[in-house]
Each structure stands twice: as structure tokens, then as C-alpha cells.
Image: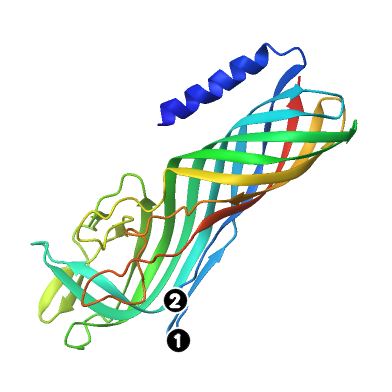
Amino acid sequence: MTRLFIFCVMLAFSSAVVAQDFNFGFKTGLNFSNIKGDLENTADAKESLDQNIGFQFGATFAWKITDLMGLRGEFMYSQKGTKRSFDGKSYYNFFTPNNDIIRTTGIRKEDLNVSNSYLELPILPYFRPHSRFEIYGGVSFAVLVNSTAFGNIKFSEIRDGSNIPTAPNSIDHELDYNYLSDKPRGATYANPAKTVSIQGDNVPYPQTAGAYFEFVENRGKLYNAFDLGVVGGVSIYLSKSLYVSGRINYGLKDVTKTKADVSLSSLDNGNFISRNDDDRNFSTQVSIGFSF
């Protein structure tokens, strides 16, 4: 599908080249992005999604239909994401060396910096009432090409299934996620591994955990491969070719998959609870560009 997407972009680019009033260029800038969605806030837990900063760069082309209006297109590499935090009552799944699962409860404090990279194709009709000012809007098609996160977790006040405290009663480790390639139970361990005593057994815990470490089975990837958004913005031309631009990009599709998007506050008889919520990309973008 990614190859098909790139082929369509190149076909559109090649078709536009033959137009008489065609120009092309490049642009780069910053994305101030977040994921807008339902938060898992209860009496005992709080989740937050905050703004993250990424970059964008790519090629642009435009077809001038009249002196007042035309059509713009872009082929961009664009980083989006969010800063996700969770603090409150939760669970933690440990795995023995024999791959048996041990479920515990406690207080989870988790912070993640999520970065999702897309190849984007915005198609933007524009209106230019003045030689130095332009208004535009349209749609943006996107393919996810990279999806990572890093952060840390502290899990404290740990109790086993019989409500007996563990020793030690608190653990912490790093989180290093690749949502596209990580596997269930994926993690790296110190040598020798750090352990927690649970009902007399010394159970290891990771030095660094992957995106799906606590999953017993494959529940799919967290983020969807495709996104669709609406775009609106303005450009100010500092010269005939040099311009600065600002825009808003709002996603029209849920970017998370229900089965892999699970509750952190509770389990259902030891089973994950899928979150059937609607998470959408939202970003404010600023850029500088040059057209030939």
C-alpha cells in the first residue's frame, strides 16, 4: 500500500508538470501536535495527552488556474504524536522464566513521548486575493511509516493476587517502544536481571520494556496505517518565491486500533479491557518554503 501511495503521488506530480502555469518547490517546519481522544480518568487514576513537537519537510507543487486561485499539492514527511501520562491504580503483568504470567496490582506512574511519522499528501485549493497573501484548505492523505515512543514507568505499592505485598514493593524501568515491530512480552533485561519476590519466587522484570511487553498474545499494532485529515491555513509571501505558512490539520479517522488500545486502570478477570474510544490527530503547523 505504501508503494501504491508513492506511485499515486508521482503520477499526480508528473501530470501537473505538463501544465503551463506550474511551479514546484520545497518547505520545512514544525508540527505542534496532539492526539485528541477520550481519557481514562477515574476516581483512582488520571490520564493526560499533551502537545508534542515534531518536524516536517518535503516537496511542493502548484497549478495556477487564474491569478486569484489554483491548486497546491505537497509530498511531506511529517512527525506527529503526543505526550501521554498515566498516574493511578493499575496492574502490572510479570512473566516468569518459564513464561508463566503473574498479575499484580499497584500504583502506575507512566510517562511516554509518542512520535508517529507519516508520508503525507495534502491536496489544497487556494485563493490569493493579494500577491503576498494566500488562503488555502483541503484534505490530507497520510501513510504511517514509523511509530515509536520512549519514557519510563514506576510501579509501586505492588501486591500479588492474594493482596500480599511484594519485596521490593516498587520497581521502575525504561520504556522504548516501536509500535510497528515490537512483539508481545518483548523486553531487554539487565545481566543479571533485577527481580521481585512474589510468593517466595524471584520474578525478573525488564530493564527496558517494549510496546507490547504486558500482552500475552498478539493483539495487533496500536496505530492505524492510514490517516485522513482536513487542512486549513494561510501563507504570507516575503518575496515572489519565499513564504511562511501556518495551518491546522485535524484528523478525520480514529488513529488507534481497539484491540491493542487497552485500559491501564483495570482488568476483567485477568483479561485486558479494550478501549473503544475515538483518537484523532490534531496539529498546528508552521513552516517556511520556497517555490520556483
Residue 228, position as x, y percentages in the image: 54, 44
Residue 72, position as x, y percentages in the image: 70, 29
| Residue drawn at (50%, 45%) of the image | 227
Residue 4, position as x, y percentages in the image: 44, 26
**Which element carries disc 2, helix, strand or loop?**
strand
Residue 43: give its label. Answer: 1
Bin the neighbour count of mark 1 within 10 Å (Cα to Cα): few under 14, some 14-19, many 20 and up.
few
Q: Quadrant of residue 207?
A: bottom left
Could you tell me the amino acid type at mark 1? Ala
Bin the neighbour count of mark 2 within 10 Å (Cα to Cα): few under 14, some 14-19, many 20 and up.
many
Could you tell me the amino acid type at mark 2? Asp
Q: Nearer the viewer, residue 271 or 90?
A: 271
Residue 108, position as x, y percentages in the image: 37, 75
Q: Is residue 213 above or below residue 31?
A: below
Question: Visible in this render: residue 237?
Answer: no
Residue ranking furthest to the right = 130
Q: Nearer the viewer, residue 154 or 225?
A: 225
Q: Is residue 100 left or right of residue 121?
A: left
State the residue position of label 2: 87
Q: Is residue 16 left or right of residue 144?
A: right
What is the total number of numbered labels drawn onto the structure image?
2
Q: Quadrant of the C terminus?
A: top right
Q: Nearer the viewer, residue 113 or 247?
A: 247
Disc nearer the start of the sequence (2/1): 1
Alpha-carbon distance for marks 2 and 1?
11 Å
Q: Quadrant of residue 111?
A: bottom left
**Which element carries disc 1, helix, strand or loop?**
loop
Question: Visible in this render: residue 235?
Answer: yes
| Residue drawn at (41%, 48%) of the image | 224
| Residue drawn at (37%, 49%) of the image | 179
